[in-house]
């Protein structure tokens, strides 16, 4: 069994804790209390989690013509072909162009467990499971973004989660160095089943595994584009695209990672994991979606700042940590079954 990777920008030290906002309420780091309606902190393991909740963002993003019908054909006509590719997934196990890896996460996992522990009483399923290596597929059914044939994609599915939901995502950069000091709190006491095949991406490479999400300067770009489909969907499926910067990620050393629920603190202290969210829709056909960093619909959930969302203009593009694609219960669990595929992520310039 390889060592589990933790991609939160935080880790469990002698006097620290690993923070999962969906499980942490207003009482410090008491993971037994209910969480806010926000976003998960970034992690590649079963220690990952977040708060699905209801988002104030309701945009459907920018969509181009579908490419392929989702029925096993090599993806149809070409869509817009990004000239600067963030992840074409030709490196099946990663990393992407900026040095980050893919992972899945959900509300099923214990907060401070390593290797990853899935709660004994957890509801729902997730494939790949938290902590497993998330490898891209290349079976000829992916989209055809540049008119040269179908490309690889990442496939994840699940449903039945009983709290905030589940998702998948990638860090812009993973580093073996913890990016910031963290407050002292008590980690959740939890027992569970060890997640299978927990691993550290890059452990076999020179330099060893990369354990922490690190900030990346993306200010030279205007946004990201990606291809997405919801396999077998008969109605549009809502997916939260979530971005984390230094003010919302514990690794930024700005927000208060021990306080998640409740109103904003005096002085306007931001509670961690209240990330920027834009909701896009996926259908049974491959479609290209675009999320621009200046979109008026790209806002924080607002649960950490007195229910007042922060606009995208407040996002620090010099310190972005991750992109997540999250399925939310929107406060009405269990999470409905889903099957999503993501491909060909590019920069918008």
Image (cartoon, rainbow, N blue to C red):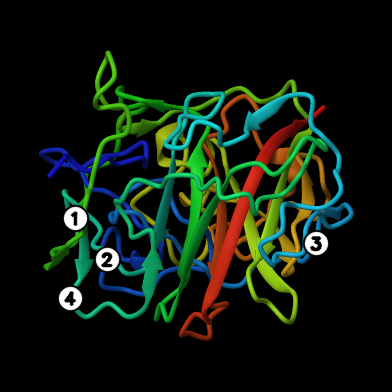
Residue with the mark numbered 1: 187
Mark 1 vs 3: CB contact within 8 A:
no
Quadrant of the image occupied by residue 98 = top right
Is residue 308 something that shows in the picture?
no
Residue at coordinates 49% horizontally, 60% vertically from top-left?
A: 156
- Residue that badge 2 annotates: 31
Question: In terms of secondary structure, where does tag 3 sit?
Answer: loop
Residues at circles 2 and 1 in contact by the CB criterion of under 8 Å = yes
Which residue carries the number 4 mark? 120
State which mark lies toward you, 4 or 3: 4
Is residue 11 toward the left or the right of residue 84 in the image?
left
Quadrant assignment for the C terminus: top right
Q: Distance between the Cα atoms at labels 1 and 3? A: 36 Å
Q: Earlier in the sequence, mark 2 or mark 1?
A: 2
Q: Which disc, if any, is residue 175?
A: none
Quarter of the rendering containing residue 287: bottom right
Q: Nearer the viewer, mark 1 or mark 3?
A: 3
- Please tell me whether mark 4 or mark 2 is closer to you in this view: 4
Picture residue at 65% right of the left edge, 54% below the top: 141
Classify mark 3: residues with Cα within 10 Å, few (<14), some (14-19) or many (20+).
some
Q: Can see residue 62?
A: yes
Write down the residue under mark 3.
59
Image position, residue 50 (x, y; %): 43, 60
Return the disc, 4 or 1, that comes first in the chain's sequence: 4
Residue 256 in the image: x percent, y percent?
Answer: 41, 46
């Amino acid at each position: 069994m390889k060592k589990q990777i933790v991609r939160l920008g935080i880790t469990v030290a002698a006097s620290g804790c690993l923070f999962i906002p969906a499980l942490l309420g207003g009482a410090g780091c008491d993971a037994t209390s209910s969480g806010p309606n926000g976003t998960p902190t970034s992690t590649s393991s079963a220690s990952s989690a977040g708060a699905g909740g209801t988002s104030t963002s309701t945009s459907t993003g920018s969509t181009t013509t579908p490419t392929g019908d989702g029925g096993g054909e090599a993806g149809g006509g070409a869509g817009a072909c990004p000239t600067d590719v963030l992840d074409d997934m030709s490196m099946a196990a990663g990393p992407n162009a900026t040095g980050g890896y893919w992972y899945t996460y959900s509300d099923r996992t214990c907060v401070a467990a390593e290797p990853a522990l899935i709660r004994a009483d957890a509801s729902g399923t997730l494939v790949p499971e938290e902590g497993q290596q998330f490898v891209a597929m290349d079976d000829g059914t992916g989209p055809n973004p540049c008119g040269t044939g179908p490309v690889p994609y990442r496939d994840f599915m699940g449903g039945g989660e009983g709290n905030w939901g589940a998702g998948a995502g990638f860090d812009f950069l993973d580093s073996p160095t913890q990016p910031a000091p963290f407050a002292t709190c008590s980690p959740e006491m939890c027992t569970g089943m060890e997640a299978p095949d927990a691993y550290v991406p890059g452990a076999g490479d020179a330099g060893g595994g990369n354990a922490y999400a690190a900030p990346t300067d993306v200010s030279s770009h205007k946004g990201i584009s990606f291809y997405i489909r919801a396999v077998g969907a008969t109605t549009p499926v809502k997916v939260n695209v979530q971005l984390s910067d230094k003010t919302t990620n514990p690794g930024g050393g700005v927000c208060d990672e021990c306080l998640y629920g409740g109103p904003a603190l005096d002085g306007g202290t931001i509670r961690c994991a209240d990330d920027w969210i834009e909701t896009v829709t996926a259908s049974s056909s491959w479609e290209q979606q675009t999320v621009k960093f200046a979109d008026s619909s790209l806002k924080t959930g607002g649960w950490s700042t007195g229910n007042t969302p922060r606009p995208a203009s407040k996002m620090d593009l010099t310190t972005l940590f991750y992109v997540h694609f999250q399925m939310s219960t929107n406060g009405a669990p269990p999470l409905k079954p889903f099957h999503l595929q993501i491909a060909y992520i590019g920069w918008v310039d």
